Image: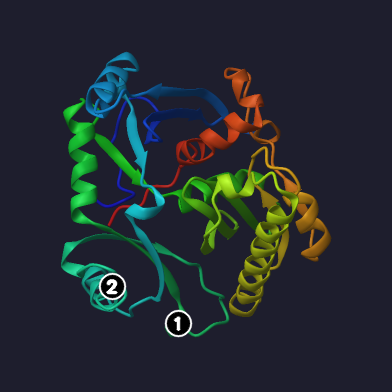
Amino acid sequence: MGFFSKAKKKQGSLIIAVQGSGYAVASVRHVTDSKPVVEMAAVFPAPAGQLDSTLERLAKELKAAAFHVGTLLTGGEYQVLSVEAPNVPQEELKTAVRWRLKDMLDFHVDDATIDVVDIPADKNAPSHAKQMFVVAARNSVIEARQNLFAGAGAGLSVIDIPEMAQRNISTVVQNEGRGLAMLSFDTDGGLLTVSCGGELYLSRRMDVTLMQLMEPDPNRAQLVHDRITLELQRSLDHFDRQYHYIGVGRVVLAPNSAQGLHEYLAQNLGMPVEKLNLADVLDLSAVPELLSLDEQQRFFMPLGAALRQDEVVL
């Protein structure tokens, strides 16, 4: 299985993400000319040592076999690398990409499951300058996740990553023709993405966790805000140099209940900074609990994965 492959099912997507000591489950229905509708956002806690049995129970309860079942890898389970696209025929792409990765991974390339995501090139740029993202994870990680879900009767159609989930949410937020920088935080740390026209152009991890962002001491909080601001400035400067033909119009902060970051960035970043409330871009009427910013933060990535519409098969 590639990370983004899909099989045909009767119904839509059901995202079941391992989260803490349990699962976060989300489902979204797309509606023509209207907001996507969140049909489900639920937590299924798993008692210690019972991830398997909990997944089996929720798969039966939700009739998961009728859906495209997807899951998300967490930050430490994969790597995303930006590389120059090999100038080879499509059927030789994976082999060529593997060769380029052999000195870039922190494990042997023969032990890697890989997939690629194109980065659209400037139409005026030379063809040899085209870049692509390569997603790589240990075979053992992918096989363990597939076996976990298959054993519960919820065979996986999609194994996704947070970068693409965040890209999906950016797509329903962004303005036509302008780049959008989005910054989110969870227990794995911060994730900055820049996307435009439904395409991911930049991905950066920040070593700042949600717990650090919630720091109550004002002096320590300012140090955290300084780190975030500096990393944002550096990343956006790099993006501007590499993708000068895409203007980033604003920075959007994913939902969380931390205090002070929005105001600090708005004062120090030099571009518009907005706080995202998912109620502005998604129909939450079926799941009113998601009106809480804490719940929006909890389900941010599963909902983003559930918004996937494109199909990538390698």
Percent across and percent down for residue 293 are 65, 32
Residue in front for this viewpoint, 214 or 117: 214
- In the figure, 85 relative to 231: above or below? below
Q: Is residue 128 left or right of residue 200?
A: left
For image coordinates 18% across by 51% down, the residue present is 140
Q: Is residue 111 left or right of residue 276?
A: left
For image coordinates 45% across by 41% down, the residue present is 305
Identify the image quadrant of residue 115: bottom left
Mark 1 surroundings within 10 Å by alpha-carbon count, few (fewer than 14), some (14 through 19), many (20 or more): few
Q: Residue furthest right?
A: 267
Residue 174 seen by the camera: no
| Residue with the mark numbered 2 | 97
For image coordinates 19% across by 55% down, the residue present is 139
For image coordinates 51% across by 35% down, the residue present is 303
Q: Earlier in the sequence, mark 2 or mark 1?
A: 2
Residue in front for this viewpoint, 19 or 305: 19
Helix, strand, or loop for circle 2?
Answer: helix
Residue 144 seen by the camera: yes
Helix, strand, or loop for circle 1?
Answer: helix
| Residue with the mark numbered 1 | 127
Percent across and percent down for residue 165 are 48, 46
- In the figure, 296 relative to 184: above or below? above
Mark 2 → mark 1, Cα distance in angstroms: 17 Å
Percent across and percent down for residue 92 are 22, 72
Percent across and percent down for residue 58 are 32, 19
Q: Tag 2: residue type?
A: Val
